[in-house]
Amino acid sequence: MVQTSQAGVCNAVHSVKQRLARWLLVASQGLDSHDLPLTHDVLSRLLGVRRASVTECLSELEDQGVISTHRGHIEITNPDLLRQTSCACFQLIHREYVRQLTSVGRCL
């Protein structure tokens, strides 16, 4: 519930680029991979913005050397810089994710 609430606040307050960076980090963490099978269209739907806005932000991130885009997937080439680009919401969501996993481990 904390993660969902934080994502809602993030969507209301932060820029598309920051939200996109957060989402890429969360997806990378969930898949345990820097190679993400995502299209611009899927990202635009997830972020609730126009596809052109996603394309513009991805181009900026690619120009900065943060990601590399190929048809149908995105590779995170500089995760540290992507974390810097993301808003602080990623750290809050990540911390809660780790806390939940740790508490489940104690119960087993």
Image: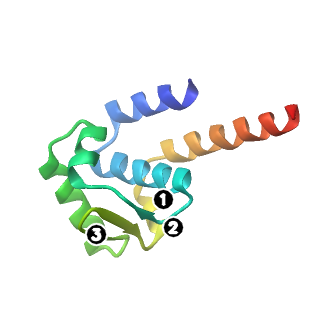
User: Is residue 27 shown above or below 67?
Assistant: above
Counting from the top left corner in percent of width and height, residue 12 is at: 32, 30
Q: Nearer the viewer, residue 72 or 103?
A: 72
Identity of the amino acid at label 2? Answer: Asp
| Quadrant placement of the C terminus | top right
User: Is residue 104 shown above or below 1?
Assistant: below
At x 55% / y 54%, what residue is drawn?
29
- Distance, label 1 to label 2, CA atoms, is 5 Å
Counting from the top left corner in percent of width and height, residue 101 is at: 72, 40
Q: Nearer the viewer, residue 16 or 25?
A: 25
Q: Does dot 2 land on a helix, a strand or a loop?
A: helix
Identity of the amino acid at label 3? Answer: Thr
Q: Please state if 38 lies on the left or on the right of 104 as rendered.
A: left
Residues at circles 1 and 2 in contact by the CB criterion of under 8 Å: yes
| Quadrant placement of the N terminus | top right
Counting from the top left corner in percent of width and height, residue 91 is at: 56, 47
Q: Does dot 1 land on a helix, a strand or a loop?
A: helix
Q: Which residue is mark 2?
A: 80
Q: Which residue is mark 3?
A: 69
Going from the N terminus, do you reach mark 3 or mark 2 first?
A: 3
User: Is residue 26 shown above or below 61?
Assistant: above
At x 54% / y 50%, what residue is drawn?
30
